[in-house]
Image (cartoon, helix red, strand yellow):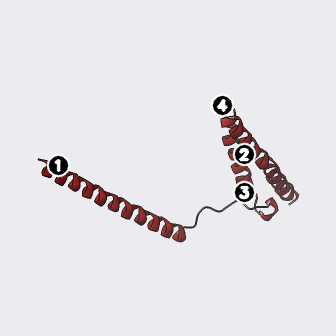
Amino acid sequence: MLLLLCRTAVARFRQAQLQEESFRFLSERVCIISSVHRIIRPSQETRPFLASECNELPKAEKWRRQIVSEVSKKVAPIQNAGLGEFKTRDLNDEINKLLPEKGHWEDRTIGFHSFYSQL
């Protein structure tokens, strides 16, 4: 009886090892496929560091909208009373960094609108 229990325990252990190996192999394949996918299909374009680098009105409006959505996503958790003080301060700091950038993009879009109105 004891020998039978040992064999089943060993068999279960070996089965768990094989399952782990297959999961590891699968995750490696997924990483390889996703890295190849990133090479073939480049990721979404990133927001320019300076608003003055953008020369198209639709893109400037897109980046401004993106910043506004980021700010609104960070404001919502701050209104939660259960959020800790440090997390609230961190979110507030991130919002304070985004607001001047939003102003730069607004100035850029206003510049485009005034340019197009002169044409």
The C terminus - image quarter:
bottom right
Of the image marks 1 and 3, the number of the one nearer the N terminus: 1
Residue 108 image point, x, y percent: 82, 56
The local crowd at label 3, few if under 14, some if 14 to 19, many if 20 or more residues have their Cα within 10 Å, is few
Of marks 1 and 2, the one in the foreground: 1
Pick out the residue farthest to the top.
Answer: 81
Residue 16 image point, x, y percent: 29, 55
Of the image marks 4 and 2, the number of the one nearer the N terminus: 2
Up the image or down, 37 lies above or below 107; here it is below
Of the image marks 2 and 3, the number of the one nearer the N terminus: 3
Residue 11 image point, x, y percent: 21, 55
Q: Disc 4 on helix, strand or loop? A: loop
The residue labelled by disc 2 is 68
The local crowd at label 4, few if under 14, some if 14 to 19, many if 20 or more residues have their Cα within 10 Å, is few
Residue 88 image point, x, y percent: 71, 38
Amino acid at the residue labelled 3: Pro
Residue appearing at x 68%, y 45% in the figure:
69
